[in-house]
Amino acid sequence: MEGASPLGEFLRARRQATTAEQVGLAGVGPRRRTPGLRREEVAMLAGISIDYYSRLEQGRERRPSPQVIEAIARVLQLDQEATEHLHELARARPHRRTAAGPADRVEPSLVRLIDGWDHVPAYVVNSRLDVLVRNLVAEGLYEGLEHSDNLLRLALLNPVARGFYLDWEMDTSSKVAHLRAMAGLDTDDPDMLELLDELSESEDFRRMWALHEVRGRTRAPVRFHRDDIGDVITTMEVLTVDGSPGQKLIVFQAEPGSPSEAALIALSDRMRKRSRGGARPSGRPEHDEDPDPGHPGPTDIEEAAAKLRHRVRPR
């Protein structure tokens, strides 16, 4: 997807996304026909020549000094993560992949841990946002959704995702920025390149990817909707898995005692009736002898809510 100069493309995209108002140039110079800063304005504010900055964007100058990069990052108001990404592009030293296989292997102890969370959806992803393993309540939450083996395929290639994620635009742009951060300059990964090529079928992905936003996913509110359980409002936590490069543990917690928690409890109860197993590789559903257990209906959720009220009742 990238042109001859990833550094130039990044600078151009972030310059066009930075407004004159943000850098104190509102009302300065001729009337603007397009949003964003002009090249000469970035050069002036960074203390470098217009010709030198133009060569950077055009790919004719690819090794700027760290001091120049820091100056441009300040002008474009990049955060620490985006600034480091800019330094990486300037160094042009791609990360080398580790041997294929270990990055996609989830430690059994981690699988046992998330399996013990009976009403907290949790799963482990790799750097491409492939879902490597998820616990039973997460299986239930994503049940029936095509492309749920990869978070971005689900969001961008499955039209149903716009109803599943109540804040689809914000959530999807966050995933795209996360993928950009994870991809870096690692052009040796054929699986990453294949994913980018597949996602490029989506006009929304092309639009979001062109912004060159770089942002790892951390804590954020995430709201889901399923017709069988209604809205589920959660807080997402994204944790790094030490010892497994590129892996992230993603956990969704509902407010204790809330209708969302009751819905997740009812969903978990239904899933556990269907399977004696625990967390398992994504896309490999397991069923017990009950072929059609149905979905948690209003009665199931009301029962779960009643249990919660009893549990939190003051003594």
Image: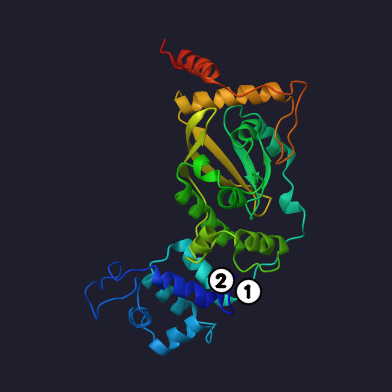
Q: Quadrant of the N terminus?
A: bottom right
Gap between marks 2 and 1 measured at Cα: 7 Å
Circle nearer the N terminus (2, 1):
2
The answer to whether 5 appears left or right of 111 in the picture is left
Q: Residue furthest top?
A: 315
Residue type at numbered disc 1 = Arg
- Whether tag 2 and tag 1 are in contact, CB under 8 A, the answer is yes
Horizontal and vertical percent position of residue 185: 62, 69
Q: Quadrant of the C terminus?
A: top left
Q: Is residue 263 above or below residue 104?
A: above
Quadrant of res 27? bottom left
Q: Is residue 313 above or below residue 251?
A: above
The answer to whether 270 appears left or right of 259 in the picture is right
User: How busy is the neighbourhood of tag 2: few (under 14 within 10 Å), some, or many (20 plus)?
Assistant: some
In percent of the image, x 33 and y 78: which residue is there?
45
Residue type at numbered disc 2 = Glu
Circle 2 residue: 88
Q: Residue furthest front?
A: 159
Circle 1 residue: 93
Tell which of 187 and 168 is nearer to you.
Answer: 168
Horizontal and vertical percent position of residue 252: 53, 37
Q: How many marks?
A: 2
Quadrant of res 190? bottom right
Q: Residue furthest left?
A: 27
Tell which of 172 and 97 is nearer to you.
Answer: 172
The answer to whether 191 appears left or right of 62 in the picture is right
Badge 1 element:
loop
